[in-house]
Each structure stands twice: as structure tokens, then as C-alpha cells.
Image: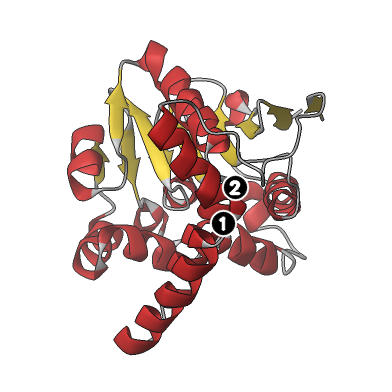
Amino acid sequence: MSLQIDQSHRVLHITLNRPEKRNALTSEMCSKMVAAIESAQDDPQIGSILISAVGQVFCAGMDLDEAVSPGNEHLAPVHEKLFTAGAHSLKPIVLCVNGPALGGGLGLVAQAHAAVAAEGAVFGLTEMRIGLWPFLVYRAVESALGARRTLELSLTARLFQAQEALSWGLVQYICPPAEACHRAAAIARDLAKASPLAIQAGLEYVRDARDRSWREAGELATVLRRKIMESADFKEGYAAFKEKRDPHWPSMPQSKPKTKT
């Protein structure tokens, strides 16, 4: 099974499971990831999404054999959805980079709202090495790293280390390899415990304010803030703060048994 999907503790866990091919992304893997992330948006039982990988490599990018095969026109739409998932998701995406993240692998990292890298992980837009440009992931990486840095990385195809990824804001944590995915899973569980209403409103603001004017973004913030402060979740959060106890969010449904596909 090249892609494993589990659900537990309100976390949807997507695992790349093709280590013999360095977790290179096939169209089937991409389609299943897109379907899982899109389905999670309307599932009240899911509070966050965790993406990790089996093996020594997080993801070496696209499966080139498939990409150059005839009849690959179906790849573009699913890649567009996959590499813009982070910009549209109203469920936080957490990612564990256990090893090299190259090309499309770096594009996946750019989708994360929080990312943990293992010490020794390397990153790169290496498409130029085979005479290609990273068209599929360029916008996502540019959004994460900035225009000039993404251009330089694309032109030179050079690798950069986890410490650079941390200093540039691509990842937020670096851990020993044995601890990285445990740390990422803990972050995903903590996010899944937060107020679903507040998480959704916050990510909705980030998504919708992006292309608005300063005034329009401010108006949106006012509307969403009022909505949250009038909600039962905020009232419960305030009461829990005053009473020095854990909140019990009204917008969080009762958990159901975990599933596995």
C-alpha cells in the first residue's frame, strides 16, 4: 500500500509508504491525498491532518516514469489541488520531514501549517538537474520562502539543510530522527484539541485575507472576531481560563472509533 490513511485522536494521519521508490509520488497517491484532505474539511471528527513517511526519505518528488508516460494529462489537475492544499485547508496540516524532501516533496512541506524536520534532513528544488523547472510546486514554495530565494533554489537546484529550513521558516522544529515524528504527532494532537470553531475561523481569515486590500482584510477580521467572541466556544474558553481548568469546546463532537484505510 503506497499510501496509508489512519484516523485517531481527531487526527487524520496520511503516511507515504513507498520507501523502495523513495516515496516518489504517483498519480494514485496524489489523488488519494487530495481526496483525504478534501474529505477532512467537512468531517467534524477530524481536528488536524498529519503527513509523514516510511523509510529514510520523506519524498523524492514525482514518479518520473509515470510523469513522462503517454496520457499523463490527468496529472495537472490533481497536482494543482495537492500543492495548493495548505492554502485552502481549514484544518491545520502538520508534517514530519524524516529525510530528504526534494521537488514535489518540498512542495508538500510548503503545504504544512507546522513542520518538524529530523536532524540531517535535506531539501531542494532539484528539477533543473534533469532539465526541468519546478512548475508544479513553485508558487507554494515561493509563498513559503519568498520570491528571490525560491528563484535561486530553482536555478541552482542546490540542496539546503534542516537548519536553513528552520531559519527561513519552512519548518518550525528540528528534532533527532527518532523523535521527529513523535513531535509532529504531538503537535497534531494538540491542534486537534483546540476549539474547532476558532481554528476554522483563523484559517478562514488567513485564506480569505490573502488577496484583499488592507481595509478589506481588516473588515473581515472584525466580522470573524465578532463571530468568535459571540460563540459558545469563546464563552467556555473564558470560563475555563477563569476557573483554571481545561475547556470543553461545545463545537467539538464526541469522538468515534478510529478508522484505517
Report the label total: 2
Element assignment for label 2? helix
Left-right relation of 2 to 143: right
Name the residue beneath numbered marker 2. 196
Give whichever of 180, 108 is nearer the camera. 180
Q: Which mark is residue 150?
A: none
Element assignment for label 1? helix
**Which quarter of the image is occupied by the N terminus?**
top right
Work out how far the residue at label 2 is from the one at label 1, CA to CA, in angstroms: 6 Å
Q: Position of residue 222 (x, y in %)?
A: 42, 75
Q: What's the residue at 42%, 55% (across, down)?
A: 130
Q: Decide: marks 2, 1 in contact (CB < 8 A)?
A: yes
Q: Position of residue 163 (x, y in %)?
A: 19, 34
Q: Position of residue 238 (x, y in %)?
A: 44, 44
Label 2 environment density (alpha carbons within 10 Å; few <14, some 14–19, many ≥20): many
**Which quarter of the image is occupied by the C terminus?**
top right
Q: Is residue 135 visible?
A: no
Give whichever of 247, 144 is nearer the camera. 247
Image colouring: secondary structure
121 to 133, vertically: above or below? above
Q: Position of residue 249 (x, y in %)?
A: 61, 40
69 to 18, vertically: above or below? below
Q: What's the residue at 49%, 30% (across, down)?
A: 190
Q: What's the residue at 41%, 83% (across, down)?
A: 219
Name the residue beneath numbered marker 1. 200
Q: Is residue 229 visible?
A: yes
Q: What's the residue at 46%, 25% (across, down)?
A: 245
Left-right relation of 81 to 173: right
Give whichever of 221, 61 is nearer the camera. 221
Three-letter amino acid code of the residue under disc 1: Gln
Three-letter amino acid code of the residue under disc 2: Pro
Left-right relation of 148 to 58: left
